[in-house]
Amino acid sequence: MKINKLIPIVIVIISFFLLGCVNPQVGTPTPTATPTATVQPTVFPTISPTPTLTATPTPSLEPVMYRVWVDSDYGFFMVRAIRGNSSYDLPADFNKLNFTIRVGDSVRWINDDGYDFPLTIISNEGLWTGRTGLMRYQTETFTYTFNKAGTYTFSIEEWPILGNQTITVIP
């Protein structure tokens, strides 16, 4: 029984040794001809006047939605920028309390308070009045689209000690 198992193994080992054995080439190899270089005349391009370029309008960028997370411990504590369906990274030195956006961009404040306190975003310049900026429960949002250039400051009515957020809107 053991011999029956050894026979295939011995055959495989012998075949590996014989795999590389081939007959040597008979005869002399034929040399390949090397092509001779032919002289090509140098062609000089003709100079033609360049056409005048017309300015093509640059496509306007899609407005950006800035999401600002707000809570009663840290105030305005995180910002994420989203254009279309994808978010993009803000610079490492991005200041979440003082940043610049363009006319047509929007800011969405999100109540992310772990204690479920209501938070009201107040516009110190009167962009909205009353309880318009109220976010009563956690995950509620308030969105504002900036249509005029200027510098605007915002605070949290219930927690004024947490500091203001300043947003500069440029054309």
Image: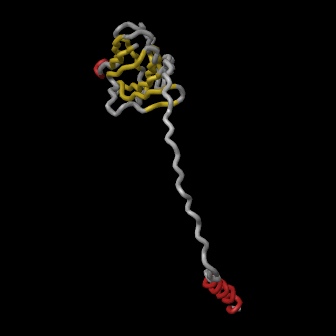
Place of residue 45 in the rendered image (x, y in percent of width and height, measured from the top left): 50, 33
Residue at image position (58%, 70%) is: 31
Residue at image position (49%, 18%) is: 52
* Image quadrant containing the N terminus: bottom right
Residue at image position (38%, 29%) is: 78
Frontmost residue, 123 versus 81: 81
Q: Vertical placement of 122 versus 23: above or below? A: above
Place of residue 150 in the rendered image (x, y in percent of width and height, measured from the top left): 36, 11
* Image quadrant containing the C terminus: top left
Colouring style: secondary structure
Frontmost residue, 55 versus 23: 23
Place of residue 13 in the rendered image (x, y in percent of width and height, measured from the top left): 62, 85
Q: Vertical placement of 80 versus 128: above or below? A: below
Find residue 119 and report its image quarter.
Answer: top left
Place of residue 159 in the rendered image (x, y in percent of width and height, measured from the top left): 33, 20
Find residue 10 and report its image quarter.
Answer: bottom right
Residue at image position (50%, 29%) is: 46
Frontmost residue, 137 versus 28: 28
Count how many numbered circles sit on residues in the image. 0
